[in-house]
Image: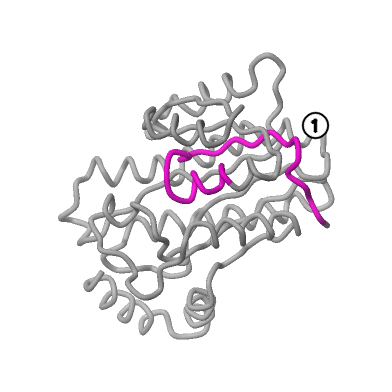
Amino acid sequence: MHRTYQDKTVLITGASSGIGAEFARQLHAQGAQLILTARSVDRLRKVQAACPGSVVIPGDLTDPGFPARLHAIATGNGRQVDILINNAGYGYYGRFHKGDLTWQLNMIQLNIAALTDLTYRFLPQMLDRPEDGCGVINVASVAGFLPVPHFTVYAATKAYVMNFSQALWQELQGQGVTVTCLSPGFTRTNFQSVANGTGGRYFEQEPAAVVQSALKAFQRGRRLVVTGAFNKLAAVLMRLMPTGLMMKAAGRAMKRA
């Protein structure tokens, strides 16, 4: 199976920076028609300027009512979304009980509830016209393979994204629509500063490499792609090694992050 992005309408959440902005740049270069959403209007406009012809719909997906509004606007005037990229998300480094509760509940709303809501709303339209190339890319994280101390809620939300995406991939087999779960590790974005962390030091990937891997995996109909050699090795170890041992190692690593 080999999909093309030429003339596909693609909705990207969290499109104002980092991996989301890189999805926009690469898909624009491949001839896709873009719908971009994020909270920051100014940064969205900069991405829009780099991707002429794209449509911008600013909004905050931590607002439970925004996914419905986004769907209504994105599909207005008979427009059809071929590919949904659920990229928006954030994390928090630190001990769970010392973090701000509202911040962490909003993380669950964004990383899980909004992603599920948007997938539910856009999927039926894709299934009504199962053209080669329709589907969903959900951005998870290599952190989703393991309970991660000091990254407690974020890792748990990404475990949900991984399991949800892969189960849905199986449900949709033979229906012309696919779901690909992207699981990167540390990536050179502003994620670490927002999450109160310092990053992955020697193992950070560039967003361009992460997005290239994701788009190739989606074209091939893959259910899961882990990007980067170090992250692939870590994912294998997390599956094979005792969970308690891996949690201790992950906890020590996160204390230093």
Closest to the observer, 47 or 237: 47
Identity of the residue furthest to the left in this view: 98
Judge from the rendering whether residue 194 lies leftward or rightward of residue 78; answer left or right: left
Labels in figure, total: 1
Judge left or right: residue 19 versus residue 42.
right
Residue 50 x, y percent position in the rendering: 52, 36
**Neighbour class for label 1 at 10 Å: few (<14), some, many (≥20)?**
few
Q: The C terminus is located in which quarter? A: bottom left
Q: Magenta segment range?
A: 2-25
Which of the 4 image quarters holds residue 256? bottom left
Residue 211: which quarter of the image?
A: bottom right
Q: Is 141 located above or below residue 249 in the figure?
A: above
Q: Which residue is drawn at 49% across and 55% down?
A: 160
The colour scheme is one colour
Observer-nearest residue: 232 or 22? 22
Query: What residue is drawn where x is 63% and y is 62%?
Result: 224
SS label for mark 1: helix
Q: What residue is rendered at 38% in x and 68% in y?
A: 147
**Is residue 92 on the magenta stretch?**
no
Location of residue 100 with respect to 68 vertically, above or below: below
Q: Where does residue 104 sit, x and y in percent of width and height? A: 28, 47
Instruction: Name the quadrant of the N terminus.
Output: bottom right
- From the image, tell me which residue sits under label 1: 128
10 is within the stretch colored magenta: yes
Q: Position of residue 36 (x, y in %)?
A: 53, 33
Measured from the top left, where is residue 212 in percent x and y? 61, 58
**Residue most extreme to the top:** 77
Kind of residue at badge 1:
Asp
